């Protein structure tokens, strides 16, 4: 942001004003010269996304549809844990990965989000927490919203460094998780970034046949390539990954599927986060029964795989990724807004 010729300490001043003092106008920055403030006003702005729609779940989860400067809309979610507050942020307007189970893919990718637009999602949630009067703030961030983070690699890396910076939002690296559908060269590149953040792989299938039907990206990067990249990530970064596995009734939730999954990941250190499918009326997939979900977990555990069932949030609102934005678009087309 600092233009050429400015002193390096200007960056620190701006960080303090933006993230510690929460300035909303450059004229509030009284220790910065008026001349430089005019330059900043000419070239930059301090605006954050505007809340377009807000849904609040009975469990306290908040899902927002946010409007950006160009009127694009993205989703972000606030989840409440006993250890803090987690923000699930989007990295793109829409998504090109085309996963058949995801509402985000129905709209296609419009553009990448800039670092400040991703940071802005966290700032909006921080403001909501302040309004609740609890003096709390976002403590954890997951880049698991709309979009493929590694398809917007540089901007997402800038975002991570801003929120991790002590003069920024000072969110601990190990409280930040990036989720990718599996782009091998970017997984390996991420391993070399020197970050202590977490990496999650959206696996969702134990073989190429099923994964091809669910995730078109697998046709470009077969699951074996993804697992090989994970092994390199573990060696370079010295960290293990989380495998996200969406359980869909009759698709990938059988005992045979569990056995295939065990064999697929047995040479890695990763663990499995099972996610029962969140049904939506715009997609045909169904959630498995409780018995099938727990049986799948038991198969993995007995096979030596560390696995858990993800805690669910916002089940009584449009919780599925991309669902609120898709619903909003459909309402606009019908002239209901």
Image (tube, helix red, strand yellow):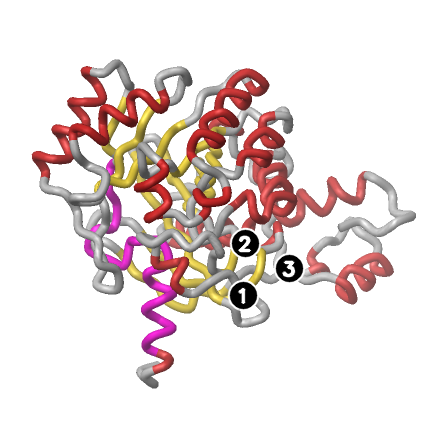
Q: Earlier in the sequence, mark 2 or mark 3?
A: 3
Q: Earlier in the sequence, mark 3 or mark 1?
A: 3
Identity of the residue drawn at 11% across and 35% down: 292
**Residue identifier under label 1:** 68
**Relative to residue 305, is residue 106 depicted above or below?**
below
What is the crowding at mark 3: few (fewer than 14 residues within 10 Å), some, or many (at least 20)?
A: some
- Residue in the foreground of this view, choosing between 208 and 36: 208
Q: Quadrant of residue 169?
A: top right
**Relative to residue 67, is residue 133 depicted above or below?**
above
Does the CB distance between marks 2 and 3 fall below 8 Å? Answer: no
Side (left or right) of 263 relative to 299: right
Side (left or right) of 154 relative to 145: right
Pair 1/2: label in front: 1
Q: Secondary structure at mark 1?
A: loop
Q: Total number of numbered labels?
A: 3
**Residue identifier under label 3:** 46
Q: Earlier in the sequence, mark 1 or mark 2?
A: 1
Identity of the residue drawn at 74% across and 44% down: 13
**Residue identifier under label 2:** 120
Q: Position of residue 11 (x, y in %)?
A: 76, 43
- The Cα–Cα distance between marks 2 and 3, rounded to whole angstroms, is 10 Å
- Residue in the foreground of this view, choosing between 94 and 166: 94
Does the CB distance between marks 1 and 2 fall below 8 Å? Answer: yes
Residue 210 located within the stretch drawn in magenta: no
Quadrant occupied by the C terminus: bottom left
Residue 312 located within the stretch drawn in magenta: yes
Q: Secondary structure at mark 2?
A: helix
> In this picture, which residue range is highlighted in magenta?
311-331
């Amino acid at each position: 942001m600092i233009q050429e010729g400015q002193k390096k300490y200007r960056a620190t001043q701006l960080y303090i004003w933006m993230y510690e003092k929460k300035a909303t106008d450059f004229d509030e920055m009284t220790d910065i010269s008026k001349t430089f403030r005019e330059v900043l006003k000419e070239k930059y702005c301090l605006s954050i996304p505007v809340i377009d729609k807000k849904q609040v779940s009975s469990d306290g989860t908040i899902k927002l549809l946010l409007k950006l400067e160009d009127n694009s809309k993205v989703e972000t979610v606030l989840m409440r844990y006993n250890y803090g507050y987690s923000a699930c942020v989007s990295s793109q307007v829409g998504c090109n990965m085309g996963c058949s189970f995801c509402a985000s893919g129905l709209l296609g990718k419009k553009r990448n989000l800039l670092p400040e637009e991703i940071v802005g999602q966290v700032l909006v949630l921080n403001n909501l927490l302040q309004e609740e009067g609890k003096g709390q703030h976002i403590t954890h961030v997951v880049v698991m919203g709309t979009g493929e983070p590694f398809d917007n690699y540089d901007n997402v890396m800038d975002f991570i460094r801003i929120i991790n910076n002590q003069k920024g939002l000072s969110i601990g690296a190990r409280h930040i998780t990036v989720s990718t559908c599996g782009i091998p060269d970017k997984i390996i590149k991420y391993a070399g970034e020197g970050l202590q953040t977490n990496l999650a792989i959206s696996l969702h299938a134990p073989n190429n046949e099923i994964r091809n039907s669910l995730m078109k990206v697998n046709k470009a990067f077969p699951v074996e390539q993804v697992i090989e990249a994970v092994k390199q990530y573990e060696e370079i970064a010295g960290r293990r990954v989380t495998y996200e596995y969406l359980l869909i009734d009759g698709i990938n939730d059988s005992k045979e599927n569990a056995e295939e999954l065990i064999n697929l990941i047995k040479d890695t250190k990763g663990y499995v986060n099972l996610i029962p499918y969140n049904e939506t009326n715009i997609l045909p997939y169904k959630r498995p029964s409780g018995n099938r979900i727990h049986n799948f977990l038991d198969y993995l555990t007995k096979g030596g795989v560390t696995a858990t069932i993800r805690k669910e949030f916002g089940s009584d609102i449009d919780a599925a990724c991309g669902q609120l934005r898709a619903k909003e678009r459909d309402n606009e087309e019908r002239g209901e807004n």
